[in-house]
Image: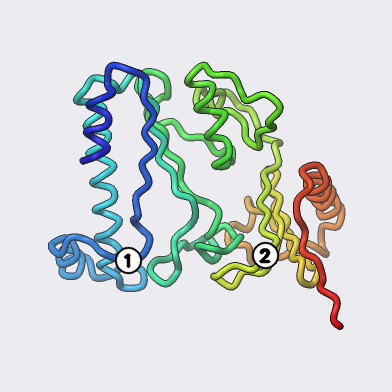
Amino acid sequence: RMAEDFVGRHRDNPLFLYLTHNAPHRPIEAHPETIAEYASTKPHLPADRPDYAALMENADACVGQVVDCIDRFGLAQRTAIFFFSDNGGLTAFTTNLPLRSGKGRFYEGGLRVPLIVRWTGRVTAGATCDIPVISTDFYPTFLEIAGTDKPANHPLDGESLLPLLDGQHVYEDRPLYWHMPVYNVFGTKPCSIVRQRNYKLIQWFEDERFELYDLNADISEKHNLIDSQPETAARMRRLLVDWQTRIAAPLPQTRSSK
C-alpha cells in the first residue's frame, strides 16, 4: 500500500521506487488461507513446505499490485520495472535443482537468479537474453535511464543494461566476479570467483584449492575440470588475479601462532 501511495503522489514527476520484500526470507509467514490451499491441493512441493509456497505466492501478488498501480496511473510507457532476487533459495525450505546448493553458497544455486524487466514500448514482451549480468549493473543502468552522468572519479563495477534491453548482443566476453574473503553463517569458506562465458572458476583461500566448471555442459557443477583443462584454468586464474590486484581486493591473511 505504501508503494502504491508513493507512486500516486509522484506520478507527475520522475520517480524511483526501490521495493524490497522480506519474502522469501524468514520468518516464513503467509496468509492462512493460502497456506491451507497449498497444503490441501498441492501436496507434492519441494521440502513439503506449503507455508513457503504460500509466502512466494503472496509476494508475487504484492508485485502484481505495484505493476497494476503503474498501469492504472498510465505510467507504463515511461516506467522501467526490474524484478530481481539477490540470491538463490534457502535449501531448508526449497530446492534450486538442477542448480547446485543455494543461498549463501557460491555454486549456481546461490548465485543464479531470475531477472525480469518490463518497460512497455521499449523492451520487447516475451524476449529473452542469456547473457549473464550482475546486480552492480543496476546503478549505471538507472543513471543512463535518468540521463544522469556517472559520478566523477568513482569507478563503477557494473555496465548499463540498456544495450541488452534494446536487443544488442554485448558483454558476451565480460568477466563477472564475486569475492568473499571471510567465513559466512552458511558455512561457506573464504573464496573468490570469476565467470566468463560458460566457464566458472572458484578459488578457495583456506587451502588454495581451485574448481573449474563448464556451465553449458554441467549446470549442476558436478565435474571439476581444474586438472583436465589446464589451459582454461590458467586463463581464468589470470583473470581473477588481475581483477583482485586491480581493485586491491582484501585477501585473507594467515595469522601466525605465538
Q: Residue at x 38, y 69 (%)?
A: 93
Q: Residue at x 38, y 61 (%)?
A: 25
Left or right: where 213 falls relative to 65 = right
> What number is the disc on residue 182?
2
Where does the image place residue 160, in percent across and percent down from the top left?
A: 58, 28
Query: The residue under label 2 is which amino acid type?
Result: Val
Q: Earlier in the sequence, mark 1 or mark 2?
A: 1
- In the image, 83 versus 10, the foreground residue is 10
Q: Residue at x 48, y 57 (%)?
A: 88
Q: Residues within 10 Å of mark 2 (few under 14, many from 20)?
A: some
**Would you place residue 241 above or below residue 210 in this image?**
above
**Would you place residue 91 above or below residue 110 in this image?**
below
Secondary element at tag 1: loop
Where does the image place residue 97, in percent across and percent down from the top left?
A: 47, 63
**Would you place residue 256 above or below residue 231 in this image?**
below
Position of the C terminus, as image quadrant, is bottom right
- In the image, 202 versus 227, the foreground residue is 202
- In the image, 141 versus 257, the foreground residue is 257
Query: The residue under label 1 is which amino acid type?
Result: Pro
Position of the N terminus, as image quadrant, is top left
Mark 1–mark 2 Cα distance, whole angstroms, equals: 26 Å
Where does the image place residue 197, in percent across and percent down from the top left?
A: 68, 43
